[in-house]
Image: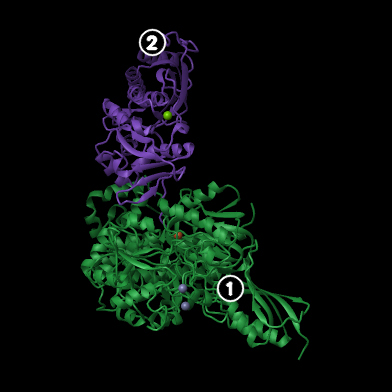
Chain colours: A green, B purple
Amino acid sequence: MTAPVRLRVRVDGIVQGVGFRPFVYTVATERGISGFVGNDAAGVFLEIEGGTEALAGFLADLRGRAPVLAQVDRIDTERLAPTGEAGFRIVASTHGTGRAALISPDTTTCAECLAELRNPWDRRFGYPFVNCVNCGPRFTIVTDVPYDRAATTMAAFEMCLDCAAEYADPTDRRFHAEPVCCPSCGPTVSYAERDGRPEPGDPIGRAVRRLREGAVLAVKGLGGYHLAVVADCEPAVATLRRRKQREEKPFAVLVADLAAARGLVEVPAAAVPVLAGTARPVVLLPRRTGALIAESVAPGNRDLGVMLPYTPLHHLLAARLGRPLVLTSGNVSDEPIAFDDADATARLPGIADGFLRHDRRIHVRTDDSVVRVFRGRPMPIRRSRGYVPAPVSVGWEFDRPVLACGAELKNTFCLGKGRRAFVSHHIGDLENVETFQAYRDGIEHFCRLFDVRPRVVAYDLHPDYLSTRYALDRGDVELVGVQHHHAHVASCLVDNGHTGPAIGVAFDGTGFGTDGTLWGGELFVADLAGYERIGHLAPVPLPGGSAAIRQPWRMAAAYLDIVYGGDLPDLAVRRRHERDWDSVVALGRRGVNAPRTSSAGRLFDAVSAILGLRDTVTYEGQAAIALEQAVDPTEQGGYPVPQDPGEPLRSTGFDLVRSVVEDVRAGVDTGRVAARFHHGLADAVVGAAAGVSERTGLTDVALSGGVFQNVVLLDAVVTGLEREGLRPLVHSRVPPNDGGISLGQAAVAAHAEPV
Amino acid sequence: LAHGAGGKATQTLVEGLFVEAFRNPRLAPLDDGAILPATGDRLVLTTDSYVVSPLFFPGGDIGDLAVNGTVNDLAVSGARPRYLSAGFILEEGFPVPDLARIVASMAAAARRAGVEVVTGDTKVVQRGKADGCYINTAGVGLLDRPHTYTATAVRPGDAVLVSGPIGEHGVTIMLARGELDIEADVASDTAPLHELVATLLDTAPGVRLMRDATRGGVATILNEVARAAGVAVVVDDAAVPVRPAVNGACEMLGIDPLYVACEGRFVAVVDGDEAEAALAALRGHPLGEGAALIGRIGADPPGLVLLKTAFGGTRIVDTLVGDPLPRIC
Ligand SMILES: [Fe+3]
Ligand SMILES: [Mg+2]
Ligand SMILES: [Zn+2]
Ligand SMILES: [Zn+2]
C-alpha cells in the first residue's frame, strides 16, 4: 500500500439538501478513506486521507455516483499533511460569510417516499407531506441561506423523536433532509367550505366528493394556490372559466399517472422523461381524438397541457379522484397566483367553492412550468417550479456580478456570478402591481440567497418597461441597455453553450428597436458582445399601437393596405370590419398612434385575421396559435418567397400576404393556406440565413423569440437549415419567449465593451 | 402678412388689431413695459407657449387656448389671474383674417377670465420657419390665500378628484387634423378654471394640490404627485369620467384617455374628510358638473400610480417617456 495522502476538497454545485454528505460518508467508508465532510455557506468541504488509488476512485465517485438531485459543478483539491486520522465522520455545518451554496429546485416525490405513502404499515402512510433528501419542497420554502431547517418555512414545525432520529442518522434517507416530518409533527391538510369554516373529517375525501359534484376548489400546492375542477365535466369547467374571467386560454390538466396521461394525449418516448421527471412541468402534447376532456379545457386546441402529480398531496388527490383534474393558477385572470394564505382567503372565495389547504407557509410564489417537446428535447415555454433556482452554467466567467432586469411580460430576472446565471422563476406581467412587488422582492431574495451584489445592471431599451424603470431607479451601478432581440439571440447562444458569432433569427411580437421602429422579424449576425442587423421584415404600421395587438384584424388592414392600396379585393375580413376599416387604414397611413414594426408575430396576426381564424384576441399570441393549430399536416407546399440578398426578408411579409389572399379568393382550404404560409415563411428564413452564411462563413443559426414556440414553423426552419448544411440552435434550457430575455441581457452585459 | 416689416406695417397691425381687441388702460400707452399696481399680496408669475395644429378646432382655437392655459396655471396655483402678456410668432403669409379671428377669441377669453392683456410682441418669420401662428402668454396673478398648493402636502388618506370628463381636448385635436375617417361628437374642453378653483378652495380648505391636466393628461399629473410626495395614488378605473364619444374615439385611436390632454380640467388632491364637500362644490359650478372622485392617496407602494380595473386587477399606470409604444412582446 502506498503512503497515505491527505487532501482538502471543496465541492461546488447543488450539493446541499440533496443527500450529499451521507453519500460522501457511504463512499468514503466503502473505500476505507478517513476524514470528514461538512456543509458551509459555500457548499461542501471535506478532508480525506487514504491511498492515492482510493482517493482517485473516491473523487471520481463524487461526480459519477452523486445523488439524483445533486449537481457537481466543480471539485477543488489541495494537498495537506497526513494526520493519521481514523474513521470518517460528518461534522456540523459552519455558517461562514461567503454564500455560494446552491438551493435545489422543488422536486417531485421520489419512488421510495411514494412507496411509503402507499404502504398501510408505514408511519407516513397517506401523509401528504412525506419527503426525503431526494425529494420534496426546497426553493419555495427557503427563506435564507445556508440551507437548513431554521431557514425554511418548516422551522415552524418541531421534529418528533422519530423524525429527529432519522434526521440525525447518516445512513438514513432523511439524514439532514430539512423538510422531514410525519403525521405526528409536521404540517396538516384541512378542508373548508367557501365561508372558511373548517370541515372536520377526512379533508382529501371531502375535497374529492366536492370535485365530483362539480365544485371549484382552491388547492394549496408547492408554489401557490391552484383552482381545480374535474376536467371531464363541461359545466364545471365552464363555471371555472366564468368565475376566473379567463375566456379561452387553455387550462392544464393533472392526471394520476403516465397511463392516465396516455388516455388523454399522445406521449412520445421523448416526452416521458419530461412528463415523469423530477421537475413535473405541464407538458403540451397532442390530444388524443376522443379523449374524455371537456371542450372548454383547451378550446380549439389540438394540444393539451398535461401534468403528473408532484407532491404527495397531488398524488393522493389524483389517485382518489380517478379522473383528470383541471389545475390552473389561483387568481382572477391577469393577477398573480395567490400563495399567501390570508391573500387566498381574501381573493379566492369569489371563485372557489371550497379550500383544500395546508399549514406549511409558501415563501416564494412559483408557477407551474410549461414545456413543449421538440425533436426529443424539452423546449421550455415557462421555466419556473421544478427548474428554478438551478443555475444555467454559461461556460465563461462573469467578471463582475450582473443583474439583468428582463422584459415586461412573462418577466424573469437573472443574476450572473462566476460561471453561473441564476434565471429567476416566472414573475409575470410587471404592469400588475402585485407582480411588480414580487419582482422587486424576488430580486432581493435572489441577491441574498446567492450572495450577489450586482455591479452591472442590464435592462431593455424600451423606455416604458417597468423593468427599465426599476433599473434606472437603482442608480447605484453601471447600467447597460440591451436591445431586445439581441437579448433573445444571446439567450439562445448561451442556452446552447455558444458565444457566437452566429447568425441570429429573432422572431417575436414587438421589441424596442434602435431606429425608432418596433422590431420583431430580425436577422442578425451576433455574438454576446454585439450584433449587426442584416435584414428584417419590412416595417408596417401598427394602427392604434397596442390596440392593433389586441385586434389582429387591424394588422390585416395594415398589411392589405400596403400590398393592395386602394385596389383591395373583396375579402371577408374587410366586410367583417367595414365600419372601422377606413379609419384604421387612415391611422396607419397618417402614422397617428401607429408606430412601425417589423414584427413577425404581427404578420401571423394579419394572416390569422385574413383567414378568419382570429380577429381579436383574449390572450397573448392567440391569433398565431390559432394559425399554427389550423395547419393541415398533409400539406407540404409553401408560398414562394423571392429573396433580395441585399435586403433579406424585406418583401417576405408582403409576398406571403399576397399569396394568402390569392388562395383565400380561390377558395383554398384554410388548413392548406395556413400550412403554405408557415412553409413559405420558413423557406424565407432559411434562404436568408443561407445567404448570410455564404457571405460570412458562419454556419450556426440561433432561433429565438416567442414566434419560435410555434413548432410547425420551428420544425420547417430547422429542417431547412439542416438541408442547407447549417446548424440550428434551438432553446432547451430557457424559453424562446421573453422569459429568456434576462439570461440574454446578462450575457450581453457581461461581454459589452465598457463605454 | 409680410415678413420683416418692423416699421409701419407691424405698427399698424399691432395698433389696429391688438389694442382694439385687448383695450385697457395699461395696454393703451404701448410703452415697452406695462405698469401694474402693486399690492401686499404675493404675486404668481407663469408662462406658456402655445403650438397647436390645427389652429381652429371644435370648441376653440389657439387664441382662447393661449389665454385659458395661462389663466389655469395661475388658478391651480391658488392665485387670482390678473394680467397677461401676449407674444406672437407668425409665419410670413399668415392670413390677417385668421389672425383677427385668433385675437378676437383671445380677447373674449380674457374678458371671460377677467384678465387684462397688458403687453405684447409680434414677430413675423420667414415662410417655412414656423407653422402659421405660435403664441406665448405670460400671466400674473395675486395669491391672497394663506396656502400654497404643492405635491409635498399630499398624504395618505387624501382623495383625488377631477373637475370633469377627461380627454376631450386632445381627442378633438387629433380628430380635427382631418386625416382620419373618424367621426365623433367631441369638442375641446378649453375653459378658464379660476372661478371653479375659487369655489373649491372656499369650500374645502383642506385642498393639498391642484394641477391642470394638460400635456400627458391625468396619468402624468398623478405620477408627478406620486413621485414628488412619495405616495401611492390609487385610481378606480370605473370612476374616471370619460364621455362615450371620447371613449369611442380613444378605442379607435388605441390611446388611453388617462394620457390625453385636457385644457379645461384639473386634478385636485383634497383631505379625505373634505372629499364629499369638495365634490359637491365642484359639481355646483357649470364647469365642474362632471367632476368625480376618482381615487385615493395611499402609502404603499410609494411613487406609483395604480389603477383598479373592473376585473379586480391593479395595474401600474406609469409616465410615458415618449409616444405610447406597445409593451406587449
Ligand atoms: Fe420578445
Ligand atoms: Mg400650462
Ligand atoms: Zn423522497
Ligand atoms: Zn415526525
Tell me what residue is drawn at x 23 percent, y 58 percent: A570
Chain under numbered label 2: B
Instruction: Give the quarter of the figure containing the C terminus of chain B.
Output: bottom left
Nearest the eye: B141 or A92: A92
Q: Residues within 10 Å of mark 2 (few under 14, many from 20)?
A: few
- Residue A50 location, x and y as percent? 72, 84
Q: Nearer the viewer, mark 1 or mark 2?
A: 1
Q: Where residue A679 appears, x then y in whole percent?
A: 38, 71
Residue that appears at 44% across and 13% down:
B11
Categorize mark 1 by other alpha carbons within 10 Å: few (<14), some (14-19), many (20+): many
Chain to which mark 1 belongs: A
Q: Which residue is mark 2?
A: B24
Question: Is residue B152 shown to the viewer in this render?
Answer: yes
Residue farthest bottom in this picture: A1
* Residue B124 in the image, given as x and y percentages of width and height: 46, 23
Mark 1 CB in 8 Å range of ligand 3? no
Quick check: do tags 1 and 2 share a chain? no
Q: Disc 1 marks which residue? A: A15
Judge from the rendering whether residue B13 lies leftward or rightward of residue A133; answer left or right. left
Inspect the image, locate mark 1, and give the three-letter code of the amino acid beneath it.
Val
What amino acid is found at the position of numbered circle 2 in the picture? Asn
Q: Secondary structure at mark 1?
A: loop
Q: Is residue A431 something that shows in the picture? A: no
Mark 1 and mark 2 in contact? Answer it, CB < 8 Å: no
How far apart in space, not on screen, are marks 1 and 2 (Cα)?
A: 87 Å
Query: Which picture quadrant has residue A262?
Result: bottom left
Q: Quadrant of the N terminus of chain B?
A: top left
Residue A622 sits above or below residue B172 on the image:
below
